[in-house]
Image (cartoon, rainbow, N blue to C red):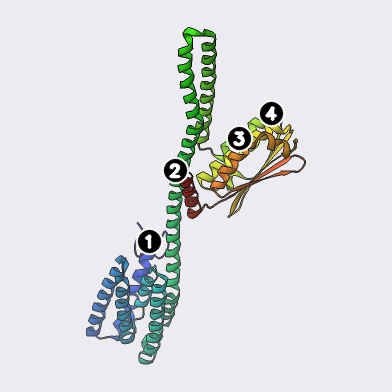
Amino acid sequence: MKKWYTIIPNSPWLSLYLWIIFCLLPFFSLFKNASATEIGVAGMLVVIYVIFNRCSAMSRSGLLYMWISFEMVISLVMTVFYGYVYLAIFTAFSIGTIRRPVGFYIMYGLHVGFTVIATGVTFFLKFDVLFAQLPFVIFTLIGVVLMPFTLYTKTRREKLEGQLETAKDRIAELIVFEERQRIARDLHDTLGQKLSMIGLKSDLAARLIERDKEQALTEIKEIRQTASIALKEVRELVANMRTTRFEDELTRVSQILRAAEMTFVFDGDIETLDVPPLVENVLSMCLKEAVTNVVKHSNATKCEIGFHQNFKEVYLVVRDNGDGVTLKNKKTGNGLKGMQERLEFINGSFKLENDQGTALTVTIPVAITHQDVTEKVDTLYNKE
């Protein structure tokens, strides 16, 4: 857990030393220019300030503004009566932790304005005191102006990162739901129908076994054939459920292309691939389907695979020097349709071009928004 006093990332002890220096070093000027009574009162105010500062650090409600206001009052008193402006930088630290933009800018404006005015008044009242520590005073005023914005930006970035992680978790849950829906549809549309057919044909074969043995044998053969088809579909369904890494799939398709006696050329850097597991899985499936079409239907002698990723999108290009896109459209409609459905779910798309062969370009956004996926799952619900 990050300590409250950490102002330098990954260096809590160095941050603690800086706080100690800011707390103790300026007291030398106070000891030189104040009586014992004034020092006692100043020490009591500092202790009270520390209590308020800790309360503001632990507060997660509207009381935060109250504690910071108390800090500002004590800081102004110490600045005007003792020339001790350094508490203002601690108050600036507390203001930087405010999450609400309106509250942050109001407290920030008040603190900077009061600190500058109090410092200017003190220069006229206690010129000798502040002039002797002028470098520290200037450094403190710069910190009062810059530190709140630095901490506020850091807090907002951490909040956005947290929201992004939450969105990713939610997207993962929605992906699981969609996959279950797809499996349920596949089982209902294909496997369920064939199992029903097997049951009906089994009853028919049982009735024909005494009257017409040849017809009964024919029905049994059809049952065997239907069962084989159902088993094949189950295997395909299980294969589609497996998560595949793009690098592993690239290795497999390269072996397939070489086995088909095709020249394989790859252009890209796999190490630059940095996408969510869902995107990588869909990208791998698109690569597998595209190369399968090239091997089965293109009559090509060469296949080029290109991969590129920038901060917004991932591009996959599979190009061959075969017969062209028209022949593929006739023979690979189901494969391309399945590819299109998977890409649409993650806001991706593909394009087929006929240019001395066939070029298939897949484009997938790196970031999948929470809203888009939720809308797609809602659509699935409505279809059901």
User: Is the Cβ of the residue at disc 1 closer than 8 Å to that at disc 3?
Assistant: no
For badge 1, the amino acid type reads Pro
Of the numbered discs 1 and 4, the one sitting upstream in the chain is 1
For badge 3, the amino acid type reads Thr
Residue that badge 3 annotates: 251
Residue that badge 2 annotates: 177
For badge 2, the amino acid type reads Phe
Return the residue nearer the eye: 224 or 347.
224
Q: How crowded is mark 2: few (under 14 residues within 10 Å), some or many (20 or more)?
A: some
Q: Quadrant of residue 49?
A: bottom left
Q: How crowded is mark 3: few (under 14 residues within 10 Å), some or many (20 or more)?
A: few
Give coordinates of residue 311: x percent, y percent.
Answer: 58, 55
Distance between the alpha carbons at the discs numbered 4 and 2:
38 Å
Q: Quadrant of residue 355?
A: top right
Residue that badge 1 annotates: 12
Distance between the alpha carbons at the discs numbered 1 and 4:
60 Å
Give the residue at x 23% y 78%: 44
Give coordinates of residue 177: x percent, y percent.
Answer: 44, 43
Dot in front, 4 or 3: 4
Q: SS at mark 2?
A: helix
Return the residue nearer the eye: 180 or 367.
180
Return the residue nearer the eye: 244 or 282.
282
Residue that badge 4 annotates: 260
